[in-house]
Image: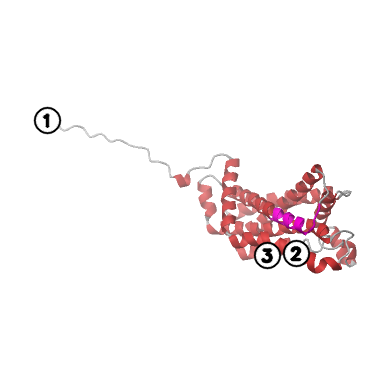
């Protein structure tokens, strides 16, 4: 019998699991996870509609129920719009805290880390998604306010400056929400941050002049972060002198960011060490 041919073993490379393929580049990771967070926000219709509709409803309540009883020296809708814009950031930040905490508790971070997209990219994705939600809410508030008689008198430069101040405040509050979402253990506990974020504009110049408040509350209202942000927006949008308010607002925002960004990183490291 002829000798049998030698057996040849061929080793083929196993294809990489696409679920564990790394996401190249830090900006690509943040962009990928931002898209994911935005899609999740769009699917969560209840929270999305609440963040869009509730600021508009509150503006309508203040304008039509309390506007006639409050003397601000101008039309009340013109006075109240900057405060409602700051209120929008509170709703967006509260949602950031709960959704980030839900992601951290679901184990999804472990899968992202296997793809070389760690928790920091996830936090950045949630923060950028918060900016997108706030942009939508701000647009809704301004459109309804224009129908109610709001007439800004700002130049292009002043409008851009107002948007920059608002963006800095939303960014700072969103990072602060990320700290809370990373520290607490349940989404319900993270939701408690919403009370702080939503309450902050009320003892400020958002809806009434601070001069009308009692002395003990007047001092707090003048020295909390929401008031200089609101005063900056009001002055810039209405074309009146802003004084030092924009610089004070930016100082608050930079201070909050300087504290909250490293705290968020430390909270993530503590959670996954």
In the picture provided, is 153 more to the left or to the right than 185?
right
**Residue 246 appears left or right of 95:** right
Q: From this viewpoint, which residue is outermost toward the left?
A: 1
For residue 238, the mark is none
Nearer the observer, 260 or 31: 31
Sequence-first tag of 1 and 2: 1
Give the residue at the far top of this rendering. Answer: 2
Instruction: Give neighbour class at mark 1: few <14, some 14-19, many 20+ (Cα, 10 Å).
Output: few
- Reading the image, the residue beneath label 1 is 2
Asked whether the viewer can see residue 185, the reply is no
Name the residue beneath numbered marker 2.
60
Relative to 54, 62 lies left or right: right
Residue 213 point in image, percent of width and height: 88, 66
Quadrant in the picture for the N terminus: top left
Q: Position of residue 64 (x, y in %)?
A: 79, 66
Which residue position holds label 3?
A: 192
Which image quarter: residue 92?
bottom right
Q: Does 265 appear above or below 95?
A: above
Q: Secondary structure at mark 3?
A: helix
The picture places residue 190, in percent across and down from the top left corner, at 64, 62
Local packing at callout 3 (Cα closer than 10 Å; few below 14, some 14-19, many 20+) is some
């Amino acid at each position: 019998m002829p000798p049998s041919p030698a057996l040849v073993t061929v080793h083929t490379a196993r294809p990489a699991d696409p679920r564990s393929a790394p996401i190249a580049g830090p900006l690509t990771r943040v962009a990928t996870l931002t898209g994911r967070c935005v899609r999740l926000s769009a699917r969560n219709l209840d929270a999305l509609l609440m963040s869009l509709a509730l600021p508009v409803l509150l503006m309508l309540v203040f304008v039509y129920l309390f506007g006639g009883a409050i003397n601000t020296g101008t039309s009340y809708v013109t006075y109240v719009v900057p405060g409602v814009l700051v209120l929008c950031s509170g709703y967006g930040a509260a949602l950031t805290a709960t959704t980030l905490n839900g992601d951290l508790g679901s184990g999804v971070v472990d899968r992202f880390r296997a793809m070389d997209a760690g928790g920091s990219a996830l936090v950045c994705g949630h923060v950028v998604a918060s900016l997108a939600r706030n942009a939508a809410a701000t647009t809704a508030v301004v459109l309804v306010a224009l129908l109610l008689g709001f007439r800004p008198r700002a130049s292009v430069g002043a409008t851009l400056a107002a948007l920059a101040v608002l963006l800095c405040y939303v960014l700072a509050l969103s990072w602060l929400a990320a700290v809370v979402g990373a520290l607490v253990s349940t989404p319900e506990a993270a939701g408690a941050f919403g009370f702080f974020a939503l309450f902050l504009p009320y003892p400020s110049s958002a809806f009434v002049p601070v001069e009308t408040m009692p002395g003990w509350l007047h001092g707090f209202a003048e020295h909390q972060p929401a008031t200089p942000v609101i005063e900056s927006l009001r002055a810039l949008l209405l074309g009146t002198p802003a004084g030092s308010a924009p610089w004070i607002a930016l100082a608050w925002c930079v201070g909050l960011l300087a504290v909250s960004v490293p705290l968020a990183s430390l909270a993530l490291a503590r959670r996954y060490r």
